[in-house]
Amino acid sequence: MTTKLKHTRQGMIGIIRIGLSLTLLTICSTTTIAQTKSIDKSLIEQLKWNDFLVIKVSHGAERYDRKEINVVYHQDSIVKIHSVLKSNYSADKQIDTVFTLSGLQLTKLNKFGKDFNDKNIVGDQIWFAGTRTFYTIVLNGETLTFDDKSGYSLILDLLGK
């Protein structure tokens, strides 16, 4: 009886060890895959249906100050953006709008995300000396910021200026 019990106990321990090993292996591989995929994903692909992607652009120059906030989100299986741009520069339009992003606009937003990661955002206008722009992205509770000399505006780019 004790020999049979000993074999049964060893068999159970073996099964438990195999189960723990498989569980540990699954957790490690899932974490690695998730990290790899999030690095490879575009900005829109990282945006889940219940997330809000907040992009802030603060542009200050000697003569004026411009602040914009762009909130990107899913609604009814489409990607929308709510943008607010306020500026004391007469050439800038004051914008407070919500609209669905088209395919071209989604491409521009993904390009902005890639350029943001590469710290390579370039405005297409000539700006005064002393100009500085701060870019901030908040997604999934993580905030990333960098500053640049560029005068780029995401909402003006999406609207085609």
Image (cartoon, rainbow, N blue to C red):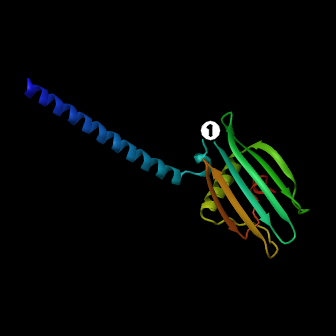
Residue at the top extreme of this rendering: 1
Residue at x 12% of width, y 30% of height: 6
Label 1 secondary element: loop
Q: Where does residue 72 sit, x and y in percent of width and height?
A: 70, 46
* Residue 59 visible in the displayed image: yes
Q: Is residue 1 left or right of residue 146?
A: left
Looking at the picture, how far across and down is residue 95, in whole percent?
84, 51
Relative image position of residue 68 (x, y in whole percent): 78, 55
**Residue closest to the far right:** 90
Apparent side of residue 97 relative to residue 38 in the rendered image (left or right): right
Quadrant of residue 126 in the image? bottom right
Residue drawn at (82%, 45%), measured in percent from left and top?
97
Q: Quadrant of the C terminus?
A: bottom right
Where is mark 1, residue-wise? 49
Q: Residue 116's quadrant in the figure?
A: bottom right
Image coordinates of residue 147 in percent, x first then y, are 69, 67
**Placement of the N terminus among the 4 image quadrants:** top left
Which residue is at a point 73% across and 68% down the rendered structure image? 150
Say whether residue 104 is visible: no
2 over 40 or under it: above or below: above
Q: Which of the two residues, 149 or 141, is positioned nearer the viewer here?
A: 141
Within 10 Å of the Cα at label 1, are there few (<14), some (14-19), or many (20+) other Cα atoms? Answer: few
Front position in the image: 17 or 107: 17
Amino acid type, residue under disc 1 in the picture: Trp
Q: Is residue 2 above or below residue 100?
A: above
Name the residue: 75% across, 69% down: 132
